[in-house]
Every structure is written in C-alpha cells, then in structure tokens.
C-alpha cells in the first residue's frame, strides 16, 4: 500500500491523519534563538500568544533533508511506494529538502515528490485525495496522476486584516503592490503559480467574509470544503453556517492555521478552499 507524507503546512486534522496514517514532516518556527517544530512542540494557541505578545518576530525554516530521510526509512519497513506532497516551492524550500532526501534514499524505494504549489487547504485537499486513493489500493503511479490532475482545479482564498506579517516574512509576492494602501481594507489573497497573488480588497472584515463565501460558491458543487482560522473560532463557525447554507451538499472540514503559516499570515487569517467542478 502506498504511504503518504505531507509537511505540516497541510494543517491536517489529527483524526484524518490517524485515519489514513499520514506521516507529517514539520517545518521549523524560530523566535530568536528558540526553535520549535510546527505542531510538534508548539501548538497554534501557544504560537499565536507568543506572536502577539512577544517582542521578537518569528521566522520559519524548511525541514532538514534528514527529517524526510527518517520518514522514508521508517515507511520503508512497511511499503516500497511513498508519495510526498509539499508546500509550494515558490514560498518554501521544503520541496527541495524532500527531493534531496529522495536522492539519498534506498534505490529500491519508489518515491514521488510533488510540489503542490499551494499550502493550507490547498495542500490538505490533494493529500486527502491521495490518502483515500491509497486506501482503495491504487498504486503510486495512479495516485501521482490523480494528484497532478487535481492540483489545477484547487481554489483557495485567504482573508487578512493586514499584509504586515507577509511583508515581514518576505512572502508577500505580487500582493506587495497593496502595501501602504488605504487603511481598513481587508485583503483577499490566493496563490497563483505557487506564489501569493491578490484577488481583491474588501472594506471591512464582514465584507471580506462575504467575498470568501461568494468565491467558494463559484467553485461549482465541491464535495468538500476546507475552512481554517487562527484565532477567530466564532467567525469560523459563522463561515461554516453560511457555506453550509450556500453549498448544502458539501462536507465541511475545519482545521487550524498552524505556526509555520501563522508567522507569515498573522493571527486573524481565515481560509476557505475546495476542488473546483467548473
């Protein structure tokens, strides 16, 4: 059976991770000289408290190739086929670490490494599809094709209160044109060609959520919608209710924006994503 590896920015809920036995390789979060592994020894709640209250702005770093090597070696005891999905290579070196580890792996081990060109919901969606396909008995080549066919159909949108965290982290991409814009405008962003890309700006948080709902409605009739918040669970529940009413046949999966993405997104990000049918 093919085994699946995803990095920690897929924000995979624990129940899903356990159900499909998905291996998670964590990114690193650094507050000065203090280093943490995303989701291993720092929780989202702990991280956002430190982000807001701390005097040192955190940074991130990709997993060392050795972490992927350890994951490959562990899984080699139970399978000879491994699929790895990573955060976009346009915003992280994680993909390169996975490739370097593959080059050092046992030649008998078949490993496919895919740059999702996404993160958050955009990484969780294909990982979940891959894990289900593996459970159904599809082989590595079949699952790889399935995932590559899905990636262009993914739609993920993020709302922010500020672009300041993206600016500090150097991940702002094309949206840098909005820096220094009118106050009280809430950016709506996505990823395009693997980098941050602007969609629109809303006058206020409520309008930004309206836009998020409208964008999800335009994905057609998705089977599943991933929704994420960092520190605004009440807003997320309201978003879930609205999406449930607007797209009643879709299963909605909730998860949290974790530390590695939170460094660059800030504490009030919300995310919605789905695989488009149109």
Image (tube, rainbow, N blue to C red):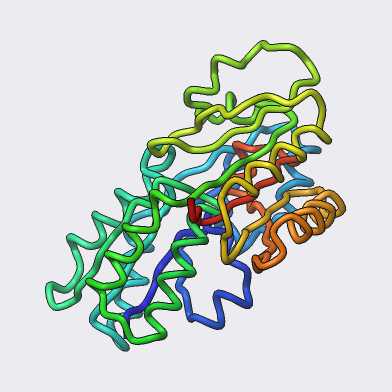
Q: How many marks?
A: 0
Residue 17 vs residue 147, the one in the foreground: 147
Residue 17 vs residue 152, the one in the foreground: 152
**Residue at left offset 26%, top offset 74%:** 140
Residue 172 drawn at (x, y percent) = 53, 27
Specify the quadrant of the image occupied by residue 178. Answer: top right
- Check the image and name the residue furthest to the left: 107
Residue 52 drawn at (x, y percent) = 78, 38
Residue 45 in sight: no
In the picture, measured across the screen, residue 5 lies left or right of residue 224, that is left
In the picture, measured across the screen, residue 130 lies left or right of residue 198, that is left
**Residue at left offset 57%, top offset 42%:** 33
Residue 87 drawn at (x, y percent) = 43, 50
Quadrant where the N terminus sits is bottom left
Specify the quadrant of the image occupied by residue 38. Answer: bottom right
128 shown above or below 114: below
Residue 178 vs residue 48, the one in the foreground: 178
**Residue at left offset 62%, top offset 73%:** 14
111 shown above or below 242: below
Residue 94 in sight: yes
Residue 259 drawn at (x, y percent) = 63, 50
**Residue at left offset 48%, top offset 81%:** 21
In the picture, measured across the screen, residue 273 lies left or right of residue 94, that is right
Specify the quadrant of the image occupied by residue 99. Answer: bottom left
160 shown above or below 101: above
């Amino acid at each position: 059976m093919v085994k699946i590896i995803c990095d920690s920015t897929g924000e995979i809920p624990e129940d899903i991770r356990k159900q499909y036995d998905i291996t998670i390789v964590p990114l690193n979060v650094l507050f000065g000289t203090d280093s943490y592994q995303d989701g291993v020894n720092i929780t989202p709640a702990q991280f956002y408290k430190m982000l807001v209250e701390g005097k040192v702005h955190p940074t991130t770093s990709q997993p060392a190739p050795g972490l992927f090597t350890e994951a490959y070696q562990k899984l080699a005891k139970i399978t000879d086929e491994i699929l790895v999905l990573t955060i976009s290579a346009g915003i992280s070196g994680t993909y390169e670490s996975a490739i370097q580890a593959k080059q050092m792996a046992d030649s008998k081990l078949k490993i496919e490494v895919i740059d999702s060109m996404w993160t958050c919901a955009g990484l969780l969606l294909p990982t979940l599809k891959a894990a289900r396909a593996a459970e159904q008995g599809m082989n590595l080549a079949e699952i790889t094709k399935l995932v590559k066919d899905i990636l262009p159909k993914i739609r993920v949108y993020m709302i922010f209160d500020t672009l300041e965290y993206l600016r500090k982290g150097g991940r702002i991409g094309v949206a840098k044109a909005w820096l220094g814009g009118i106050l009280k405008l809430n950016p709506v962003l996505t990823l395009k060609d693997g980098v941050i890309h602007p969609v629109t700006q809303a006058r206020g948080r409520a309008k930004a959520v309206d836009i998020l709902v409208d964008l999800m409605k335009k994905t057609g009739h998705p089977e599943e919608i991933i929704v994420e918040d960092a520190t605004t669970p009440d807003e997320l529940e309201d978003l879930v209710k609205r999406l449930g009413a607007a797209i009643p046949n879709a299963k909605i999966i909730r998860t949290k924006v974790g530390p590695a993405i939170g460094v660059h997104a800030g504490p009030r990000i919300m995310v919605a994503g789905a695989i488009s049918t149109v």
